[in-house]
Amino acid sequence: MTETVKKFRLSEFVKDGYLADVIKARLAPLEGAALERAREAVEDLAASGMQGEFQRLARRYCLAIAEAVDPKRKPVTNPRIDRTIMKNKHVAALLDRELEGATAEEVARANAVVRRIVDGAKGVEIIKADQGEGERQVVHEASPVCKLPDEHPSSRCGFMKTVEGWSEVYVLAVRAAVEV
């Protein structure tokens, strides 16, 4: 009796080309048994029919590959961003979604990133315009949120964002901190 081995074709499982590119990039450095376990994890996740937005799907596939490659990976049961740092409940809930499947070390990195952003925002000084004419000026050190150092107009300052803009800043920072 001969055993036939079917060639792994990612296109059979993942129809989205961008998602397939992300998965291929994660599978590329793997070899041997680790590659086979990762492929099986991709097949299993694709067979589950999971749906969602691109970033969430990409994260789930990357987590599945990471768990298949490293069986000792221990995700936290219910990862949450530290509520003493992030007091806004809506933003905290968004960040908790990004922490899905994260290990304790990844949660600690995410909390550290959020703390750095919050501390940077606390160091912003706003100088009011003279007699209501002109534009307010902002003074702070350069940071990832606003690259402009020293004094500059508030209209050009990265710290002057809407609530949605700040939510995006935090989500992208946490995403980068927990990327596997």
Image (cartoon, rainbow, N blue to C red):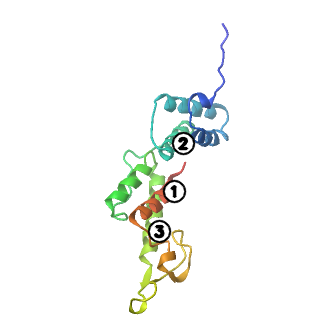
> Which amino acid type corresponds to the residue marked 2 in the rendered image?
Cys
> Which amino acid type corresponds to the residue marked 3 in the rendered image?
Arg
Task: Report the disc number at residue 119.
Answer: none
Q: CA distance from mark 2 to mark 1?
A: 14 Å
Earlier-in-chain disc, 1 versus 3: 3
Name the residue rendered at 43%, 66% in the picture.
Answer: 115
Residue 148 percent location from the top left of the image: 56, 77
Task: Report the disc number at residue 62.
Answer: 2
Image position of 54 with respect to 163: above or below = above
Residue 20 percent location from the top left of the image: 60, 38
Earlier-in-chain disc, 2 versus 1: 2
Q: Name the residue carrying label 1.
A: 177
Choose between 121 and 135: the one closer to the eye. 135
Earlier-in-chain disc, 3 versus 2: 2
Name the residue rendered at 59%, 31% in the picture.
Answer: 39
> Which amino acid type corresponds to the residue marked 1 in the rendered image?
Ala
Q: CA distance from mark 3 to mark 2?
A: 26 Å
Image position of 179 with respect to 27: above or below = below
Q: Residues within 10 Å of mark 3 (few under 14, many from 20)?
A: some
Q: Which quarter of the figure has residue 38?
A: top right
What is the secondary structure assignment of the residue under circle 3? Answer: helix
What is the secondary structure assignment of the residue under circle 2? Answer: helix
Q: Say whether residue 72 is visible.
A: no
Q: Name the residue carrying label 3.
A: 116
Q: Is residue 31 left or right of residue 168?
A: right
Q: Which quarter of the figure has residue 128?
A: bottom left
Q: CA distance from mark 1 to mark 3?
A: 12 Å
